[in-house]
């Protein structure tokens, strides 16, 4: 009986820890615009995403080689899920989000808010694909988290005052990225039933490369790299930092946590992304956090804490 209790306590600890790995992985995404916006001064959206994936795969290739035996048992349904993760959630969604940042709509807040529609897409897919039951009080917790996200981005502003911002091209691109990333959450959870998270992460980068090469080649845009040594060094450093921190490290943490976390829980954990993005905006661009933004921060973390406690119990 003592061994059984120890095992149960261990499993509860793993589930709770996995949830916070997802929170941390998603939080690192908040630093992504800091690097991506600088790169947009010199490169197109597809060029940035292509270089990012080349760097990521160079780091992930040894991991994929060491886990190559897992590739032997891939079935058609698993292959389709991997293509959705790599082509949709990695390549196309990243391009759409990068284009949203450079669309000139002038409202990064609208782009960030629309990303938080990911839980809606993911919960619907998880219900049909993974047959997952919703957690207790999920509707209330979801509304709390979404309300917190809204306060972080728009403050006390009335929603109807921002209708024109939602129909701009940047918002539509962001909505497409949110749908693809939300779906990738579910597909990633499905794949982790038969593969290690390191293998899924490596395949995500590898399988996206052919599509990204095709998109970049068909685009026909020139590679506008700076000629000065200082600017070229800055671009190189930013590319590596973007690929490693909000790219590779965040995904490894994310998939590690996702392996013991239900997709419907994970989508709420991903709400740490806008929270960190606002903090980065405050630190890097000296935009002070307001009272409604602080209240939104509290709302999101209350929802995350409640979900974590439910998992442990």
Image (cartoon, rainbow, N blue to C red):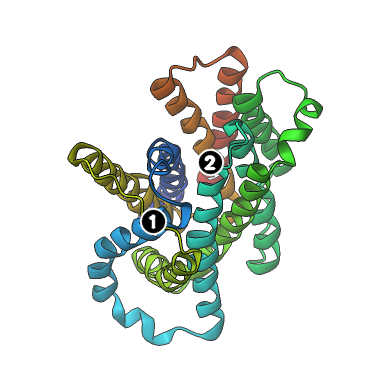
What is the quadrant of residue 88 in the picture? Answer: bottom right
Relative depth, front residue between 3 and 264: 264
Residue 156 picture location, percent across and down:
70, 18
For label 2, count other residues whose C-alpha is less than 10 Å away and answer few (under 14), some (14-19) or many (20+).
many
Relative depth, front residue between 55 and 104: 104
Relative depth, front residue between 181 and 208: 208
Residue 257 picture location, percent across and down:
43, 52
The label shown at residue 7 is 1
* Visible residue check, residue 229: yes
- Give me the residue at 48% from left, 60% from top: 90
In the picture provided, is 77 more to the left or to the right than 1?
Answer: right
Report the Cα–Cα distance between label 2 and label 1: 47 Å
* Visible residue check, residue 1: no
Quadrant of the image for the N terminus? bottom left
Question: In the structure shown, which secondary structural element does the residue marked by tag 1 occupy?
Answer: helix
Question: In the structure shown, which secondary structural element does the residue marked by tag 2 occupy?
Answer: helix
Find disc 2 in the rendering and name its residue.
101
In the picture provided, is 180 more to the left or to the right than 253?
Answer: right
What is the quadrant of residue 34 in the picture? Answer: top left
- Give me the residue at 24% from left, 44% from top: 232
Instruction: Point out the tag, 2 or 1, that comes first from the N-terminus.
Output: 1
Relative height, residue 307 to residue 198 (above, below): above
Residue 48 picture location, percent across and down:
40, 53
Q: State yes or no: discs 2 and 1 in contact (Cβ < 8 Å).
A: no
């Amino acid at each position: 009986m003592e061994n059984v209790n120890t095992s149960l306590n261990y499993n509860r600890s793993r589930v709770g820890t996995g949830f916070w790995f997802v929170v941390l992985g998603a939080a690192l995404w908040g630093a992504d615009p800091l690097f991506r916006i600088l790169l947009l001064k010199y490169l197109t959206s597809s060029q940035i995403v292509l270089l990012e994936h080349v760097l990521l795969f160079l780091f992930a290739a040894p991991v994929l080689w060491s886990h190559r035996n897992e590739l032997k048992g891939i079935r058609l349904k698993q292959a389709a899920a991997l293509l959705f993760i790599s082509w949709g959630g990695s390549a196309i969604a990243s391009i759409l989000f990068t284009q949203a940042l450079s669309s000139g709509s002038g409202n990064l807040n609208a782009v960030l808010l629309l990303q938080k529609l990911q839980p809606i897409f993911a919960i619907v897919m998880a219900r049909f694909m993974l047959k997952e039951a919703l957690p207790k009080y999920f509707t209330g917790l979801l509304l709390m988290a979404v309300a917190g996200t809204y306060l972080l981005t728009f403050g006390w502003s009335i929603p109807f005052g921002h209708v024109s911002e939602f129909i701009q091209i940047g918002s539509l691109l962001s909505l497409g990225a949110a749908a693809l990333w939300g779906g990738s959450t579910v597909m990633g959870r499905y794949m982790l039933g038969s593969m290690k998270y390191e293998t899924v992460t490596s395949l995500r980068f590898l399988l996206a490369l052919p599509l990204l090469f095709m998109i970049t080649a068909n685009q026909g845009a020139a590679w506008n790299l700076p000629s000065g040594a200082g600017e070229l060094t800055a671009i190189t450093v930013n590319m590596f930092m973007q690929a490693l921190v909000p790219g590779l490290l965040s995904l490894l943490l994310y998939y590690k946590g996702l392996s013991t976390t239900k997709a419907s829980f994970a989508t709420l954990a991903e709400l740490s992304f806008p929270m960190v993005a606002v903090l980065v905006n405050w630190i890097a661009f000296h935009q002070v956090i307001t009272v409604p933004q602080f209240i939104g921060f509290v709302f999101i973390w209350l929802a995350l804490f409640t979900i974590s406690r439910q998992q442990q119990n």
